[in-house]
Amino acid sequence: MKTAGSIFLRTHFPPPTKLLFLPLTNPKHSLSLIPISISFTRFSSTNPNPILYGPSLHKGTVPTLQCPQNDALLTLREDAFTRVFHLSALRVPSAHCSALETRLRGHLLNWPRVRNIARVPGDDLDPDLASLVTSGESGGGEEGHVSLQRRIYGQAEGDGDVLSPVLYREKLARTFNTRGFVKFRNLAKISRPPKRKKKKKEEEEEEEVKVERRTGKNGFATVEVVEEDDNGGGILGNLVEEEFGREKWRGSTRLLLLDERYAGRGVQDLPEAIKVAVLKEYAEKSANLTFELVRCKLTLFYDYWQMNEILEVLLPDGVVVPSAFETVGHIAHLNLREEHLPYKTLIAKVVLDKNKPKIQTVVNKIDSIHNEYRTMQLEVLAGNHSLVTTVVENGIRFQVDLATVYWSSRLATERQRLLSGFTRKDVVCDVFSGVGPLAISAAKIVKHVFANDLNPFAVEYLERNSVLNKLERKIEVFNMDGRRFIRAMYASDKAQSITQVVMNLPNEAAEFLDAFRGIYKDRPKDTECNLPTIHVYGFSKAQDPEFDFHERIRIALLEVAVNVEMRRVRLVAPGKWMLCASFVLPRSVAFANTAIDT
């Protein structure tokens, strides 16, 4: 039965479809059921032709290259990444450009790093002369041209016009050339700057500068007017005032780049918000306002595209784009996968180009750390071959040579967390200090620091960095094995002052904890002594990394009851965690009899 309240909605999507019956309450009729046809369309993330908005290397047109595009990509020719986009724009007077941009927001180009306002080459005018050139009621038109001509030739005296500074100085030079100005016969000559004889080289440089001005401040885009709609009603003033005619542009103008969805459209196809709501309002203010629809060519060069956009085009399908790297001073440290190695030179070149001038060298770690000095095997892929750099961390400068010492900027947050727990009364013992990222930073906070490292190159840079930051009086530097260093420190009179011990050698630090066993064995057990807080770092691939690392600490100390505060630092690899365990050295371990242990 068909009732007056029944409604049937039909969609235009292909099957499969499902029918749902929804109740509709009508005050005049009884309850009816509405059959609604709903279609489901499956969208795949691997769609070969996705709808893209905004600039993309997969859109636009590619200019003609001197070599095939595939060869250009293999050699990383920058012109292979130039893309041309055809857009529409409104040419408007520069005086009304900012106001129109606000009113037209939502209809203008909204691409990252591209301004939606462009200059028209060659039509800029000095604001002081604009009133003389443009037509209007305030001295414009023919009268303005006559006034301008009289001012140029110095005939404006008595007309009420103000002379330009150059003409005013020349007038003074001609008038006051006696008595008081006798000694200044060169005044007329210096009133004007001397004319320079331009050489061919200077003229060529000026032409290059003009080209650079068209590309904008950053030089990654150009906007050119390629076509003006002469026959299609291009002057939008005709839409709102019939008496508006096409006049020659006078004064500076700007291009308001319209959104890409309006590219190729005529005036009649533009939204009413542009044709009436905005343009009519401004056209009614003055009978001489003209808004012109022009076609533009927006060219985006290699410098515009981001690093990941370039690499997506360079690398084959299925290869993960490397998007992150560690920065050490002016050095970019990559950890490329095996699938990236055939393209390592191209990847390094892109990383270098997109991060200049901060990055000057790009390196790749070719092997994991296996030696006792913790130095990395690095391969220079691009830039200069100097691995000596300066790193600034927490306001402290560190000189580092990545070829001979170890440095990790990714542990800066962890070092800052550790420093926040130190006080002025603390005495810190850094067993594996390296070049001193923690030891020197702690020296600004604590009372004293004892720093040690086995690598002689690291010790050299540690001493150099302590002098560089004027902290050499608060740091004592040692060059010995970590286990020997711990025993030597607690065998001396410095043992009672040590309150914090840091052991940041994740591969082996837990194995050095046995050096703390029996450090006070030669003293009576009832002696009051200062037990340090130990911060030890380690790696774990176990399913429960905290439990696994805790077990290794208890085994090294030969102590079951160890109250440990565990913290995950970061995930260094899939399934591999770096952890930090902090605990106060148990009294039973410090006074243990090592003779019984052996």
Image (cartoon, rainbow, N blue to C red):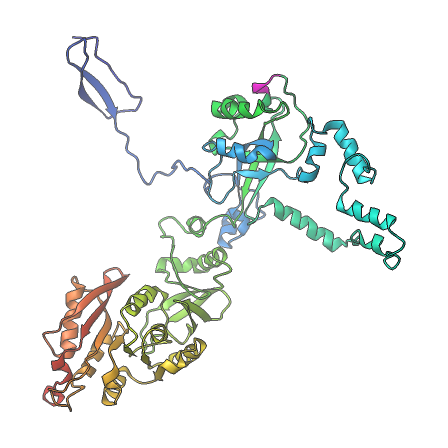
Do we see residue 487 in this rendering? Answer: yes
Please count the marks in the image: 0
Q: In this view, does 15 lie above or below 405?
A: above
Q: Where is residue 333 in the image (x, y as percent from the top left)?
A: 40, 64
- State whether the magenta stretch is mostly helix, strand or loop: helix
Residue found 19% across the figure and 66% down from its top: 566
Q: Is residue 537 magenta?
A: no
Q: In this view, does 320 lie to the left or right of 76?
A: left
Residue found 53% across the figure and 45% down from its top: 82
Residue 28 sits in quarter: top left
Q: Where is residue 264 in the image (x, y as percent from the top left)?
A: 52, 28
Residue found 90% across the figure and 54% down from its top: 178
Residue found 52% across the figure and 41% down from its top: 115
Q: Is residue 482 above or below residue 71?
A: below
Residue found farthest to the bottom = 522
Q: Where is residue 259 in the image (x, y as percent from the top left)?
A: 48, 33
Q: In this view, does 518 lie to the left or right of 83?
A: left
Magenta region, residue range: 238-242
Residue 137 sits in quarter: top right
Q: Position of residue 277 (x, y in %)?
A: 49, 23
Q: Is residue 241 magenta?
A: yes
Q: In this view, does 21 lie to the left or right of 9?
A: left
The quarter of the image holding the N terminus is top left
Do we see residue 456 in this rendering? Answer: no
Q: In this view, does 328 lie above or below 188?
A: below
